[in-house]
Image (cartoon, helix red, strand yellow):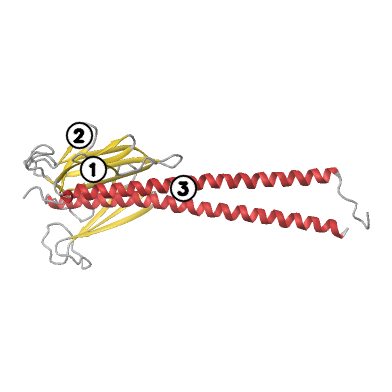
Amino acid sequence: MKERGATLYFAVIIMSILMAAVFSLSSLVLVQIQTIKSMGNSIIAYYAADTGAERVLDDLYQSIFDDDGEYDSVDLDNGSSYKVWITQPVGGALPNIPTSGACNAQYYCIKSVGTYNNTRRAVEVSG
Amino acid sequence: MNGGNKGFTLIELLVVAGLFGGLITLVTGIFIASLNVERNILMTKKVLGEISYSAEYMSRALRMAQKDYLGLCIGESNSYELTGRGGLKFVNALQDYKCQEFYLDNGQIKTDIEGVVGDLTSSGITVDKLDFNISGASGTSDNLQPFVMLYIESFAQKSSIIKVQTSVSQRNPDIR
């Protein structure tokens, strides 16, 4: 009778080992999926942020100065979006642009945040 | 036999073999599925790598575009021009002021520098779309800094589609 009990234990142990192997494998794959997704989102968000910075630089070049230094969020065709803030150093000469002690540049500091699928990337430009 | 070991009945054996068979099928199924997922991940990584490289290469080149004063590459005094095959042509200051074109050919992004053609993406991935949208790039009278919107849509076998969009302006001042 003792040996028949042992068979049950063996079966339970083997099944647990198999289950553990499968669960660890799937958790590894899940982690990989998460990583690659956020990597892809990150690249798309970065280019959206870059677009925002370029847009505002273009505005500055054409002497278009935003009222409160905060641009409305803009959605791009690929589902990403960007939002831009602009400040100038204390005592700066640009009209309308708010001043900020944190801006350590000669004329302006631009911060652009690109968002795609909850992944955000930011780009800062100063000049 | 000795002691109480009388072996197993057929039913017991069938039940055990069934349970074990089911478990093995499940494990193998999950293993094969994860191998497939792994392959998709690798393909997506490849697409991401190649697309981010080509986007980086193109935006760097487009930033360094120079107005074509002589009109040898594109129309005189233009900065960028769309070409017949849906590409974009300009004078690149980084390439000794040679005439460079980016275009889509057979699912690959290619660059043509005065007849010398190079691939920006490999044949392992398919680029579905390469769109350029230009503004302020013609002549001097528009009073606008040349601006290019770049859109790439790409995938590889079984990978997800990656859509990248960005905008680039010419660094060399066009006006003032």
Disc 3 to disc 2, C-alpha distance: 35 Å
The three-letter amino acid code for the residue at tag 2 is Thr
Above or below, B82 against A8 in this view is: above
- Residue B133 quadrant: top left
Res A72 visible: no
Q: Position of residue A57 (x, y in %)?
A: 18, 53
Which label number is shown at residue B83?
Answer: 2
Q: Is residue B173 visible to the viewer in this orientation of the structure? A: yes
- Residue at horizontal 77 percent and vertical 58 percent from the top: A9
Q: Which mark is residue B41?
A: 3
Q: Tags 3 and 2 in contact by the CB under 8 Å rule?
A: no
**Do callouts 3 and 2 point to residues on the same chain?**
yes
Q: Mark 2 — on which chain does it sit?
A: B
Q: Residue furthest front?
A: B116
| Subunit under mark 1 | B
Labels 2 and 1 within one chain: yes
Say which mark, if any, is on residue B149. Answer: 1
Whether residue A49 sits left or right of residue A30 in the image: it is left
2 or 1: tag closer to the N-terminus = 2
Q: How many circles with numbers are drawn on the protein?
A: 3
- The amino acid type of the residue labelled 1 equals Met
Residue projecting furthest to the top: B84
Helix, strand or loop under label 2: loop
